[in-house]
Amino acid sequence: MAKSRKNQSASIRFGPALAAFFACFVIACAAVGYVWQKGQIYQLGKQIRQKEIRLTQLQKEDDQREKDLADLRSPLKLDARARQLSLGLVPAQPMQIVRLAEPSISAAESKNSARQFALRPITQ
């Protein structure tokens, strides 16, 4: 004979309801996590775009400053600036230029290049 519902224990009656609640809770948590993750991806993408724009701006500024520096270092600009400031600078005369010859390394010194300074006599 079948038992009546009044005689069934409470755990048997609430078991399916508890399982359904747990399944709904897991699905809701997964949905909230999915939405949060999509928001994070959107925010990070936005930050990356902003940083790329800033990088492009900084590269343009760097290029412009390199051009400005090259322009300021040019001999024509330096000469014009020296004349503008009345510094009295003139090109060096040929007599004022001293050219130094590069010392040659002999075969014996090239073999002992680590000791070449110790082999030279000290003159005072």
Image: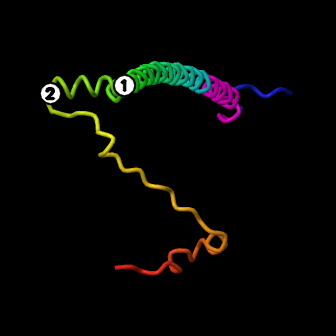
Residue 40 coordinates in the image, percent (x, y): 52, 24
User: Is 22 within the magenta?
Assistant: yes
Label 1 sits on what residue type?
Arg
Foreground residue among 69 and 113 = 113
Foreground residue among 113 and 68 = 113
Most prominent secondary structure in the magenta stretch? helix
* Mark carried by residue 85: 2
Taking the image as shown, residue 77 lies to the left or right of residue 61, namely left
On screen, 62 above or below 103? above
Q: Residue furthest left?
A: 86
Q: Which residue is mark 1?
A: 65
Compute the Cα span from label 2 to label 1.
23 Å
Residue 33: which quarter of the image? Answer: top right
Residue 9 coordinates in the image, percent (x, y): 68, 35
Residue in view at x 34 percent, y 28 percent: 75
Q: Total number of numbered labels?
A: 2
| N-term mark: 2 or 1 | 1
Residue in view at x 51 percent, y 80 percent: 118
* Mark carried by residue 119: none
Q: Which quarter shows the C terminus?
A: bottom left
Q: Which quarter shows the N terminus?
A: top right
Taking the image as shown, residue 62 lies to the left or right of residue 96, namely right
At mark 2, the secondary structure is loop
Residues under numbered marks 2 and 1 in contact, where contact means CB atoms less than 8 Å apart: no
Residue 74 coordinates in the image, percent (x, y): 36, 26
Q: How is the image coloured?
A: rainbow
Residue in view at x 29 percent, y 23 percent: 77
Q: Which residues are magenta?
A: 9-27
